[in-house]
Amino acid sequence: MKFSDFSKLIKFRLTFLVVFSASISFLIGSYMNGHIVWINWIKLIVGGFLVTSAANCFNEIIEVDLDKLMKRTMDRPMPAGRMTTGQGLVLGLAMGIAGTYLLGSLNLLTGLLSVFSILLYAFAYTPLKQKSPIAVFVGAIPGALPPLIGYVAAQAHGRIDAVALVLFAIQFVWQFPHFWAIAWVLDDDYKLAGFRLLPTGARDKPSAAITFLFTVILIPVSLLPTIYGYAGWYLFGVSLVCGLIFLYQGFVLLRKCDIKSARQLMFGSFFYLPVVQLMFLIDLIGKKA
């Protein structure tokens, strides 16, 4: 298999963002515990990469006939005929089992959460995409699990505490403007496969208003680490500035309701999450120094 085909099969850019989010949250959890076990960090990265790749692989097996209909997906290896669904299934199972084993070796809860994320993404979110915009809400749960999994993986006995829930909440709320901006840009392509992903199912003012609402909600949610004393004012400042920029981009979409504005919001979302998560880590390092 060519690397380009493997990259398309596992949705490499999406997988990278997921693993990045989990790895930063692992370091956040480690700093809060007072030490970093680097071999566990590597296990998390490799295991997280394999589990996410497996979930994406199962998603493409289920949607192979739909992927043939969309311009952005028709060149993936399975819809293009360069890989059979049987081969994809074997590869997905191998990656899923290996990844779950690695994550489970960190602690039981990390392994269980990884299995839950695969099942929810591939077998709940995926079939819902053709049925209702509620799919985005369902998909936001596995989409927000990476920072939770990363943080839990840093705990020797694996536990979900308030910090883990805050990390989950930030990524959970962020996903709505992020994904709806993508859905707005790609709506014509999505409709070819019958996907209903915008809040109202159309590029209209109500969809833009709901998207804007979540950029509003994201601001107070992103400030929770400082409000509850888990991080300092540097994170507060960066989160507020990033949130206001994101809010403005959402407002522009609300005002213009065009693809250009949605694309700007989409690119803004790509920067928002890693910047805020990195700043959380940098703030913690500064407090420990």
Image: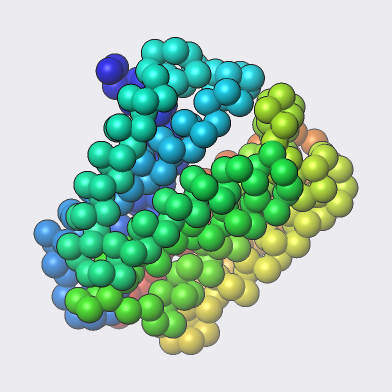
Residue 148 horizontal/vertical position (percent): 40, 67
Residue at image position (22%, 47%) is 98
Residue 66 in percent (x, y) is at 61, 26
In the displayed structure image, the side of residue 256 where residue 232 appears, left or right: left
Q: Nearer the viewer, residue 70 or 19?
A: 70
Residue at the right extreme, as displayed: 205
Is 237 left, or right, of 127 in this rendering? left
Q: Quadrant of the N terminus?
A: top left
Who's the residue at 27% across and 76% down the image?
158
For residue 28, above or below residue 255: below
Residue at the spot 68% in from the left edge and 68% down from the top edge: 217
Position of residue 216 in the picture relative to residue 19 (left or right): right
Determine if residue 257 is in view: no
Residue lying furthest front in this view?
A: 86
Image quarter of the C terminus = bottom left
Q: What residue occupies the far bottom of the structure in this picture?
A: 228
Q: Quadrant of residue 7?
A: top left
Q: Is residue 61 visible?
A: yes
Where is residue 281 shown, x and y percent of the image? Answer: 34, 67
Residue at image point 41% right, 35% down: 57
Quadrant hosting residue 154:
bottom left
Q: Nearer the viewer, residue 71 or 121?
A: 121
Give the answer, above or below, for where 117 lies relative to 132.
below
Which colour style is shown? rainbow
Q: Quadrant of residue 277?
A: bottom left
Measured as percent of width and height from the top left, residue 106 is found at 20, 65
